[in-house]
Amino acid sequence: MIDGVKVRPLKPIHDERGYLMEMIRSDWPEFAKFGQVYITIAYPDVVKGWHYHKVQTDNFIIVKGTAKVVCYDNRQGSKTKGDVNEFFPGERNPMLIQIPPLVVHGFKAVGGESAYVVNAPTELYRYEKPDEFRIPYDSPEIPYNWDVKMG
């Protein structure tokens, strides 16, 4: 696991009416602070990445569909520099994925349907000076291929 990336399995609480699932709580060790909450939708087979933040920590939860979430440690001096983590969260595999500053990340809907990603980042989005730095999804600097892996 990339140093600083954390994963928490989430537990839907089901009854005859449906279910409730806590996504992040202030008494969990993953909680640092609250900036905002937003939802983003990834269409099937479209890569949303790469990007990273210098200050913000992301807290991803996929609430509909399934996504491939990939993290790459490009941090100088990190004991896991060069490592890649690949996760497949979704409705059938609910989890919180916490991505610290400077860890490059992206995601892609898999399974033929859109993926709905809720993010509860630690910082507010600053429209005039966003803490978001982009890298092309096919950058040769990142040792990862977004294509489907058959096996």
Image (cartoon, rainbow, N blue to C red):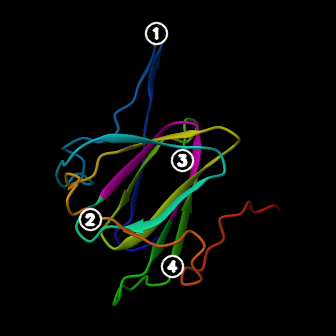
Q: Quadrant of residue 19?
A: top left
The residue under label 3 is 89
Compare residues 14 and 74 and report the one nearer the observer: 74
Q: Earlier in the sequence, mark 1 or mark 2?
A: 1
Residue at the extreme bottom: 77
Q: Which residues are magenta?
A: 58-70
Residue 92: percent from left, percent from top? 58, 37
Q: Earlier in the sequence, mark 1 or mark 4?
A: 1
Q: Earlier in the sequence, mark 3 or mark 4?
A: 4
Dot 3 falls on a residue whose secondary structure is loop
How packed mark 3 is, by other alpha carbons closer than 10 Å (few <14, some 14-19, many 20 or more), is many
The image's mark for residue 17 is 1
Give the spatial CA distance, label 1 vs label 3: 24 Å
The kind of residue tagged 2 is Asp
Dot 1 and dot 4 residues touching (CB under 8 Å): no
The kind of residue tagged 4 is Asp
Give the spatial CA distance, label 1 vs label 4: 42 Å
The residue under label 4 is 83
How packed mark 2 is, by other alpha carbons closer than 10 Å (few <14, some 14-19, many 20 or more), is some
Label 1 or label 2, whichever lies nearer to me, is: 2
The residue under label 2 is 131
How packed mark 1 is, by other alpha carbons closer than 10 Å (few <14, some 14-19, many 20 or more), is few
Give the spatial CA distance, label 3 vs label 4: 19 Å
The kind of residue tagged 1 is Arg
